[in-house]
Amino acid sequence: MSDEVAEPQIRVLLDVTALTAYARLTGMGVAELIATIEEEGGAGLVGIPAACFMTAYWQLDADEQERLAAMVTRPDAVTVLLPLLGTDALEAAQIGDVMGHAVIAARRTGAYLATYDADEAGRHLPDSGVLEVEDKLSTTRL
């Protein structure tokens, strides 16, 4: 019998709308979503597309930037920063700076895309791949 430990999987990705809401404390939906993934005990991760992180970061004031940076740099965090590969850069740019990289990452990983703009996300992904963030998360398990 093997004692192999399964590699954590990215369960959900955050676009710019979700990242800015988290950093500005304008809704608790993203924090609740992260807490849900933390409850998986290391089996799941929250993906932060680098291009979305940078776009969100530039929109925030200093305190909010600090909160966002802490989200991705905390040693025990379930968040992981995802690189934008050169082969995906053009398509991500064509989709747009708010969710372009997040859409590409969702397609690559099969993870849900968490957003406050489900209509826009639905233009690029099937509805089953879009998780509309609200202040109160549904009881759907990821």
Image (cartoon, rainbow, N blue to C red):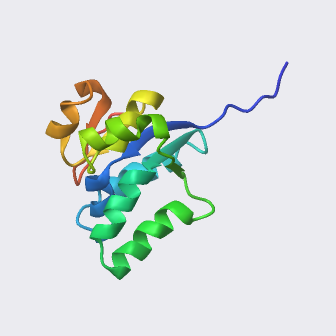
- Looking at the image, residue 63 lies above or below residue 75: below
Q: Nearer the viewer, residue 81 or 135?
A: 81
State the image coordinates of residue 66 (x, y, percent, origin top left).
Answer: 43, 75
Rendered image quadrant of residue 27: bottom left
The residue under the point 38% across, 35% down is: 104
The residue under the point 32% across, 68% down is: 58
The residue under the point 40% across, 41% down is: 89
Q: How many marks?
A: 0
- Name the residue furthest bottom: 62
Q: Quadrant of the C terminus?
A: top left
Q: Quadrant of the N terminus?
A: top right
The residue under the point 53% across, 50% down is: 80
Rendered image quadrant of residue 4: top right
- Looking at the image, residue 52 lies above or below residue 103: below
- Name the residue furthest top: 1
State the image coordinates of residue 129 (x, y, percent, origin top left).
Answer: 31, 29
- Name the residue furthest right: 1
Is 74 on the left-hand or right-hand side of 26? Answer: right
State the image coordinates of residue 13 (x, y, percent, origin top left).
Answer: 40, 43
State whether residue 108 appears in this view: yes
State the image coordinates of residue 33 (x, y, percent, origin top left).
Answer: 38, 49
State whether residue 141 appears in this view: no
Is 32 on the left-hand or right-hand side of 5? Answer: left
